[in-house]
Amino acid sequence: MVIKTPQTALVTLIFVTFVWGSEFTLIDLAMKVIPVNTFNAVRFTLAGLSLIPLLLLSKEKVLKAQIRPLLGKGATLGFVLFIAFYTQTEGLKYTSVSNAGFITSLATPLVPILGFLLFKTRANRFVWLGIVLATIGLYLLTVGDKLAFNKGDYIVLICAFAFAVHMLLTGRFVVSLPVIPLTIIQLFAVGVYSAISAFVSPNPAFYLAGNPPLSWQECIFSPIVLTTILIASLLGTAYAYWAQSACQKLLPDYKVALVFTLEPIFAYLTAWLILSEKLGLSGAIGALSILAGVILAETGDKFLLRKRTTHVASPHSSK
């Protein structure tokens, strides 16, 4: 698949967000069987391996002068992504899923803010208004009236900053480096960092506290864990992060972040279908606010430009 236009990139990112939102329920179930760092070590390593055939079949070439930047920047992206996943999971030990979901989503407004502070990247007023609408929607959808801060929330806030920095760095790195090799290296890097964390942990790598002891074969090949690893590795990681990197060649960072606010909507839809969870009035208003924010940010400036063009072309139209 080749992503050549901003419109194709937008649709691709929406599909990625659908995958992420849909796999949330599966991952939540798998985390009751396998430790998080062990799961991420297997998930990201398998994802990196699955992209090697795509690299061999693609026309992307790695120049000798690009090898060192690829290794360095891929390892950097992988470390930032590892921090994001690790702090989100660690924070969940002390805070609620709804708080963690909302605070993680603060990566969306952080992207244009950090982009301006670090790289002087500017977003138009429709994007800012869309971000405000989406953030309000995320609050209504994930938290409602139940927000109460604790130490876990501050840990998850590190996750939000990490995801924002990852999007900003990806947008800059893909300008001069081939997408597939960069994606493979960062996925392998996350796998290595996760494996190190799993094995230096005081608990065994394949033992989850409170569960009966399992061998690594019983743990990995339990139906829910194996299914989740395959879906999360191939679609939610290999395809998703390749697609994000490819799309960021065509879309600005803040628009990518805004599209990702659709993830909790897909997560709730999946939970409704599989677990019969209900959204409620507050959640429904939040979902509509997110959609309005994404649509406004994507079409607002184009609508205004069309309106101005029409006005200039028809100077007597107001009479």
Image (tube, rainbow, N blue to C red):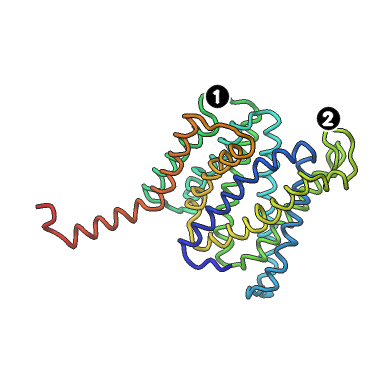
- Height in image: 232 above or below 185? above
**Residue topped by disc 1:** 146
- Dot 1 lies on which element? loop
Q: Earlier in the sequence, mark 2 or mark 1?
A: 1
Find residue 307 and report its horizontal and vertical position in percent.
25, 55
Q: Which residue is mark 2?
A: 210
Residue found at x 50% / y 57%:
11
In the image, 272 versus 105, the foreground residue is 272
Q: Nearer the viewer, residue 67 or 269?
A: 269
Q: Is residue 276 toward the left or the right of residue 113 in the image?
A: right
Q: Which mark, residue 22?
A: none
Q: Secondary structure at mark 2?
A: loop
Image label count? 2
Which amino acid type corresponds to the residue marked 2 in the rendered image?
Gly
Q: CA distance from mark 2 to mark 1?
A: 28 Å
Q: The N terminus lies in which quarter of the figure? A: bottom right
Viewer-proximal residue, 147 or 15?
15
In the image: residue 158, left or right of residue 197 = left
Question: In the picture, residue 130 is in which quadrant?
Answer: top left
* Residue 226 drawn at (x, y percent): 78, 49
Identify which amino acid the numbered label 1 is placed on.
Lys
Q: Residues within 10 Å of mark 1 (few under 14, many from 20)?
A: few
Of residues 167 and 49, the one drawn nearer to the viewer in this rendering: 49
Considering every residue shown, the one lying at the far left of the view is: 319
Report crowding for label 2: few under 14, some 14 to 19, many 20 or more residues within 10 A (C-alpha): few
